[in-house]
Amino acid sequence: MRRLTVVQLLPALHSGGVERSTLEIAAALVAAGHRSVVISAGGRLVERLVAGGSEHIALPIGRKSLSALRTAFVLRRTLAALRPDLVHARSRLPAWLARFALRGLPAPRPHFVTTVHGMNSPGRYSGVMRSGEAVICVSETVRAYVLRHWPDTDPERLHVVPRGVDTADFPRGFVPSEEWRDAWKMQYPALQGGRVLLMPGRGTRLKGHAEAIELLASLRAEGQDLRLWLLGTDEPGREAYLDELRALAAARGVADAVLASPPRHDVREAYAVADLVLQLSTKPEAFGRTVVEALSIGRPVLGWDHGGVGELLRALYPAGAVPLGDRAALARAARTLLAAPPPMPVTIPHTLAAMQSATLEIYDQLVAD
C-alpha cells in the first residue's frame, strides 16, 4: 500500500464529537504510515493533534463572512501545494470551500469524502454534505435522514460508520480509585447518601434536563433516595437556563437532590459511580456516544427511543428504550433498571478500532478505483 496524504477539513479544533472523530482518524492515518493533515482555524486540540504525528494548517474555513471566497482561493493554493490523495470535509462551509477549491486543481484531482455528523436543516446549504464521492453517515438514523431529505442521493455512496469508543478507556467493570472517590465526595456532598442518576450533556434545552428533573421528582415521591447529577450543564453563558432548571427542581421539591456541574474530563469515573445513566434529548441525536460509553463500562442506560440514541438502545440495551415523551413509561423503566437491570451486552461493536478501520478502508477503496 502506498503512502497517502489525507487532508481533513473542519471549522476549528476546540472540543466536540466532530473534533474527536477528526483526531481519531488522524491517529489511525499516522499509525498506518500515511501523511495526515488537518486544516482548521485552530483551537486547544491542535497541540494534541500535532503531538500525535499529524500536521495542522491554520485557515478560517468555518468563518461565514464575505471573506469566505478569498479563503477558498487560499485553500486551493494550499491543496495544490500539499497534493493530497484525498480531502475529507466534516462540516458544511468547509465542504463548500473544498468543492470550489478542488474544481480549480489540475487533474488528477484529490478524491472528496464527506461525513454527515448531524441531522442538519434540510436545504441546499446542508445538501453539500452528501456530495462526496463517498459519504460517511455516523448512524443508520443519519443515513435515513439524508435519503429522506435529499432523495436524489445515490444510496451506493452512503457508508454507515458508527462512532466508536475505545474500550480500553471505558473498560467493563471499571472502578474509580479511592483517591478519586474521596475527592468526588468532598466536591459534591449533595450527591452522597443515595443512588445517583447521571445525565451527561451540554447545558441546552434540547438535552431534556427538565425531563430528568421530572423523573427524579416522580421517583423520590415513591420514597426512592435518588440524586440527579447534571454533568456538563454548568457552562458560561448558560446561567439563565440553569436558573430555570433550579426553579423547576425547587417547584418539584427536589432542589437539594439536583446538582449541575461543569464539564469534566473524568467522565469514565462519573459513569462508574452512577446507578443509572440518562439520555433524554428531545431532539433526535445523530449517534449518542454517551450510550455506548456507559454500556461499555457496564452501567444501565435509559433514553428516549428516537434518533441515534434509540437506534443504539434497541440494538444494545432494549430495556432502556422508552417511547418519546411517555413519562409514565420512563418512570416504569427507571424503576426496573434501578431494581434489577438486565445484563449488559456481551460485546460492544461500536469501537474506536472498528470506526478507524472502516474509514481507512473507504479511503483505500477510493484511491484504488
Image: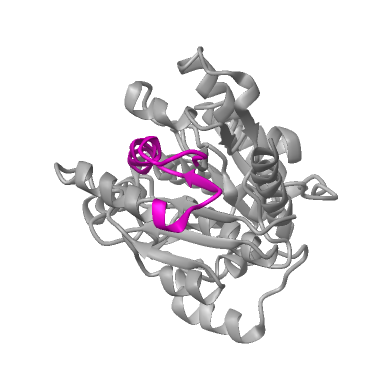
Indicate yes or no whether the magenta region holds residue 81.
yes
Indicate yes or no whether the magenta region holds residue 33.
no
Return the residue found at the far left. Answer: 66
Front one among 56 and 319: 56
Residue range in magenta is 80-109
In x, y percent, where is residue 92? 37, 38
Q: Residue at x 52, y 83 (%)?
A: 183
Quadrant containing the N terminus is: bottom right
Q: Which of the 4 image quadrants contains residue 46?
A: bottom left
Task: From this view, report whether residue 82 is shown above or below residue 92.
Answer: below
Front one among 306 and 144: 144
Q: Residue at x 58, y 39 (%)?
A: 138
Front one among 266 and 14: 14
Front one among 286 and 156: 156
Q: Residue at x 58, y 33 (%)?
A: 134
In x, y percent, where is residue 49? 49, 69
Residue 198 located left or right of residue 300: left
